[in-house]
Image: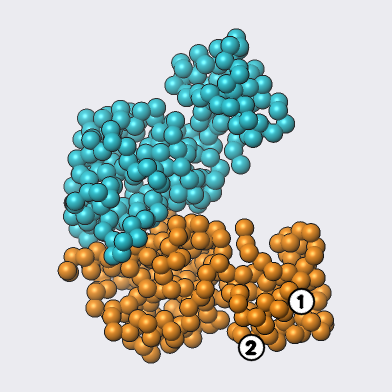
Chain colours: A orange, B cyan
Amino acid sequence: MESIIFGKNAIIEALESGKREFNKILISNNSKADIKIEQIKKLAQNKGIVYQFVAKEKLNSIEPEGRHQGVIAQLSPIKYTDLDDFIEQNKGKLSSVVVLDGVEDSHNVGAIIRSCVCAGVDGIILPSRRGVLINSTVEKTSAGATNHISIIKTNSIVNAIQRLKENDYWVIASDHHAEQNYFEIDYTDMNFALIMGAEHAGISKSLLKLADFKVKIPMLTNFNSLNVSNASAIILFESVKQKVSKK
Amino acid sequence: MESIIFGKNAIIEALESGKREFNKILISNNSKADIKIEQIKKLAQNKGIVYQFVAKEKLNSIEPEGRHQGVIAQLSPIKYTDLDDFIEQNKGKLSSVVVLDGVEDSHNVGAIIRSCVCAGVDGIILPSRRGVLINSTVEKTSAGATNHISIIKTNSIVNAIQRLKENDYWVIASDHHAEQNYFEIDYTDMNFALIMGAEHAGISKSLLKLADFKVKIPMLTNFNSLNVSNASAIILFESVKQKVSKK
């Protein structure tokens, strides 16, 4: 399902060529002291690519024939956009972006990207370390929407949110403990960054602190458990409704 | 993933006992002239259970060890509700129901049921022949919501809609060719049945004709392609918003 490169030399070459878009690099716990692994780590660091140490079994599950030599690079089918470029490109108009704080299900991420494009959202921000990046399942579930929006991968969501705030984006966090309803804010006259939390954990506290607005979706029953892609659609299409009604 | 019974005698016994909830019965094209298959067809007919003729390969893919004897019954993990019972149970209050016209993806059906429960919808109607019935993937994706709503399986969606209309439900069809926006109707003072179409085909013409309201979800871009579970959530939570705001 996922596009990968494995083997030390192949990954070093791909890193040096700069022609491939990496999601992350997975290194076996047993391979820490290897000289070529050291080289991979250094190259990755220089290029801001995340590497993570995992059990060898994890690598075997991704490349079952065992030719991985203790290291697998997961590639992205799309080119990520740099956050500063994104901000620059969207200056001078009302802009919006959705921040996914560790959403783990590829189907959810794909459906959210699809709704974002329909709702005129300009960008999606995904964390490099937690949750899902763009893979072939995300692409397929998005129905091609990944090609119609800027997708930003960041090593620090907190820093990304701070950059957005410095550039006149208002931060809205979806939080079911919030007092304000999502339809009580005016989306039509501001740039906004909407943060949606992971399926089980919700939004991390460090991000909630940065929010200018916390909003909830009221329910008619105690079964308080909307799917994150549906929750995103509900809030985004309230913003669409307001914009369409104002025209 | 799915609970099944296979083999002629086992299925005859299950049908006669009346203790199992059937989704449908699949019969191999080659088994048409068999006397026990005739018995299965008759029992199924008497109980309103759908049977369909399929290629033997389809049966082999469900029961790979080839012990199926040309017939497999797909069971449901939940008990379906009878439409007339549903209507009776929901008399005397404002009631709503979502009708899925052939939605094919189990993840979508599960997510829609989850949103329905959060939005206080009383029932879901699924067609017996097309699209997905309740299976273990639907159950899992619904996060347990299948236990908190009436689920109705019908051999004719058209007849079901007509029964609902006779019982004072207004029929709303989600149709992207509609002129009216989904937020321009008042959901707070009527029983309603919301029809959502299949992923690719949309709502069938015979159902569109029965609609009292056709509504669209306006988009901000030309990428007019919302996921059906997100589209359902957007419309249902407009109804929730209206009800919450009116209180």
Closer to us: A123 or B170: A123
The residue under label 1 is: A9
Residue A178 in view here: no
Residue A167 vertical position relative to residue A31 in the rendered view, above or below = below
Callout 1: chain: A
Secondary-structure class at tag 1:
helix
Residue A62 in view here: yes
Q: CB of mark 2 within 8 Å of CB of mark 1? A: no
Question: x, y percentage for residue A225?
Answer: 44, 57
Task: Residue at 77%, 75% (x, y): give it.
Answer: A8
Task: Residue at 51%, 61% (x, y): give it.
Answer: A139
The residue under label 2 is: A46
- Left or right of B119, for residue B48: right
Instruction: Using a 10 Å C-alpha cutoff, classify the residue at mark 2 as few (fewer than 14 neighbours), some (14 to 19) or many (20 or more).
Output: few
Mark 2 vs mark 1: tell me if same chain.
yes
Q: Quadrant of the C terminus of chain B?
A: bottom left
Task: Residue at 46%, 17% (x, y): give it.
Answer: B45
Closer to us: B246 or A112: A112
Q: Say which amino acid is labelled 2.
A: Asn
Instruction: Using a 10 Å C-alpha cutoff, classify the residue at mark 1 as few (fewer than 14 neighbours), some (14 to 19) or many (20 or more).
Output: some
- Left or right of A94, for residue B190: left
Give the residue furthest to the top: B35
Residue A237 vertical position relative to residue B16 in the rendered view, above or below = below
- Left or right of B161, for residue B200: right
Quadrant of the image occupied by residue B171: top left
Closer to us: B111 or B203: B203
Task: Residue at 34%, 32% (x, y): give it.
Answer: B157
Q: How many discs appear? A: 2
Give the residue furthest to the bottom: A166
Question: x, y percentage for residue A131?
Answer: 56, 69
- Left or right of A24, for residue A162: left
Q: Say which amino acid is labelled 1.
A: Asn
